Amino acid sequence: MLDIQEQQILSAWHQNAQPWIDAIANNEIESRIAVTNQAIIDAVLAEPTQTAVDIGCGEGWLVRALTSHGLDMLGADGVPKLIEQAQLSGDGQFRQVTYEEIANGQLNDSFDTAVCNFSLLGHNSALGLFTAFPNLLNSNGRLIVQTLHPLIACGTEAYKDGWRPGSWAGFKGDFVTVPWYFRTLETWVALFTQHGFRLIHLYEPIDPSTGHPVSVILVGQLTQ
């Protein structure tokens, strides 16, 4: 059962689907174009991978990008409009499935790599996915998560886990605000190690215009 914040996230994304599709199509998110898109592609391609799943794939840009590199990709998202757009936009396979459904075993494929690119916004939903990841991955499979860098995203608030109000400042579309669950870097690392993953890489993509990290990418390898 989803708590109120998780329900708000999913509800908001049903409303934000079209503004998000427009923002991606119009290249409105500067950090993605300058830094984070290529960073996640590089992280996935850093080790041999044949099959991968993009969980929270949105309109499917990463699936299409990695398919062009020869990977057999599946994109999964719980928002129907995003999946519809993904299916219309080109290569790759896509499936409408919520995080709760994945946690309950309804995505019964297996992959070399699972990717969550800025898509782990909640608390219990993320915990459910981490519990499911070992069953989604082949032996020695990788889990790759890109998220906002905790030290930068923390802002002036206390550096501790907890729910934070969202913001779409700088975006042109009519977005509904999405709450999100802040985790310290220590907590992110613990999520990997507590669920059977050995952290093998930690990348901090840097914004060349500021010299500050835009995001953090954690790469874990399944040890169970």
Image: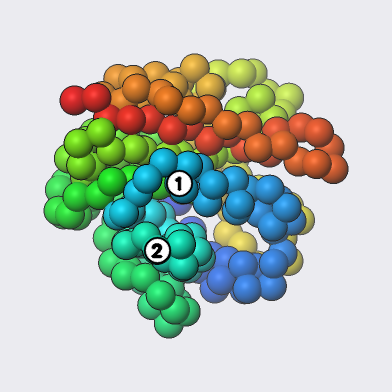
Direction from residue 189 to residue 41 in the image, left or right: right
Q: Residue 126: percent from the left, percent from the top? A: 36, 38
Q: Which mark is residue 174?
A: none
Q: Nearer the viewer, mark 2 or mark 1?
A: 2
Outermost residue toward the front in this view: 48
Residue type at tag 2: Gly
Residue 149, above or below 36: above
| Residue 99 place in picture, x, y as percent | 30, 50
Tell me the residue at 69%/72% (across/down).
Answer: 26
What secondary structure is marked by label 1?
helix
Q: Is residue 121 visible?
A: no
Is residue 34 left or right of 18 when viewed as pictured? right
* Number of residue marks: 2
Other-residue count near label 1 (Cα within 10 Å), few / some / many at <14 / 14–19 / ≥20: many
- Specify whether 185 is left or right of 220: right
How far across and how far down the image is residue 87, in percent?
Answer: 38, 77
- Specify few, some or many for label 2: CA neighbours under 10 Å numbering under 14, 14-19, or 20 or more: few
Q: Which residue sits at x=46%, y=67%? A: 68
Residue at numbered disc 2: 70
The residue lying furthest to the bottom in this view is 88
Q: Amino acid at mark 1?
A: Val
**In the image, residue 156 above or below residue 42:** above
Foreground residue among 84 and 211: 211
Reading the image, the residue beneath label 1 is 44
